[in-house]
Image (tube, rainbow, N blue to C red):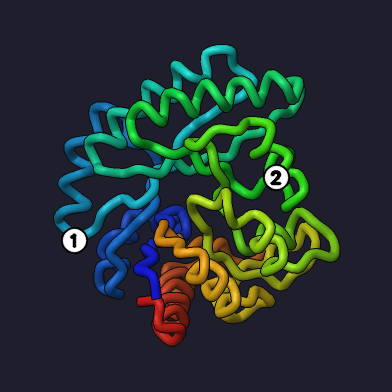
Amino acid sequence: MPPSIIACRVASYGDFESIALSHLASLGVRNVEIPVPAPHELESTAARLAEHGLRASTLHGACDLSRTDVAARVEAQMPAFAALGTRIMFTSAKAGDTPLETAWARLREAGDVAGRHGVTIALETHPDLITNADTALATMKAVNHPHVRINFDTANLYFYNHNVNGVDELRRMLPYVAAVHLKDTDGGYRSWCFPALGRGVVRFRETFDLLDRAGFAGPCTMEIEGVQDETATERLVCDRIAESVGYLRGLGRL
């Protein structure tokens, strides 16, 4: 199978993010998704990652399409990608009140900036640009930029849509997918129930089969967001992530 990168989003640890790097290293995970560090934090961030034998496969950056200077703001984040050797900028971008044509043009400008640095912007599976396959494909075709792509979230398709099939949605979006969030769900619309991988409705084996057949080798990042109204203790969070790692090992992904 292709060597897809398995990572974990450190925000999955919630209030216990300070232990994320050491815990992931103890589980044998070698890649993480972290926020774009501030310039004065680059050296210390690189050192912490190296200390735990980790690398940042994805950086969570900002791409605010309501701003006229969005391209300049993306440019300002690029030194972090060079310093950490990261090539994927995960971001949630929305048109909102910005006319679609303007939002698309700003994404093209941001893509130009990212591309000059060898970085690809991966848009999260969020309304209103990547809500589902229909809107995602419309956005991709309108923006038409090789450095603006999709971050396919296996659970958000169910959270933001009624009556969808995640595997079918991925099949349609696959040519534009640059990164994946591995997240499980109970499948309910707007249901904040994101348990350990393998405990919900997401068909991960079929998802990986599709990615493998397409030769996808990009980052597949665990995102374990928990369940609404639960008390998220350190033990619960760590056990849930450890269970998810075990599940992926059982699928032969780690």
Q: Residue at x 39, y 52 (%)?
A: 33
Q: Residue 53 in the image: state x and y as whole percent.
A: 18, 61
Q: Residue at x 51, y 58 (%)?
A: 180
Tell me the crowding category of disc 2: few under 14, some 14 to 19, or many 20 or more residues within 10 angstroms, Cα based. Answer: many
Residue with the mark numbered 2: 137
Residue 180 in the image: above or below residue 142 = below
Residue 38 in the image: above or below residue 173 = above
Q: Residue placed farthest to the top in the image?
A: 68
**Residue 229 in view in this figure:** no
Is the C terminus in the top left, top right, bottom left or bottom right quadrant? bottom left
Q: Secondary structure at mark 1?
A: loop
Q: Residue placed farthest to the right in the image?
A: 163
Residue with the mark numbered 1: 53
**Amino acid type for the residue under numbered disc 2:** Leu
**Residue 242 in view in this figure:** yes
Left or right: 192, with 67 as reference point: right
Q: Residue at x 31, y 68 (%)?
A: 29
Q: Residue at x 41, y 30 (%)?
A: 114
Tell me the crowding category of disc 1: few under 14, some 14 to 19, or many 20 or more residues within 10 angstroms, Cα based. Answer: some
Residue 30: image quadrant is: bottom left
Left or right: 136, with 124 as reference point: right
Q: Residue 246 in the image: state x and y as whole percent.
A: 41, 82
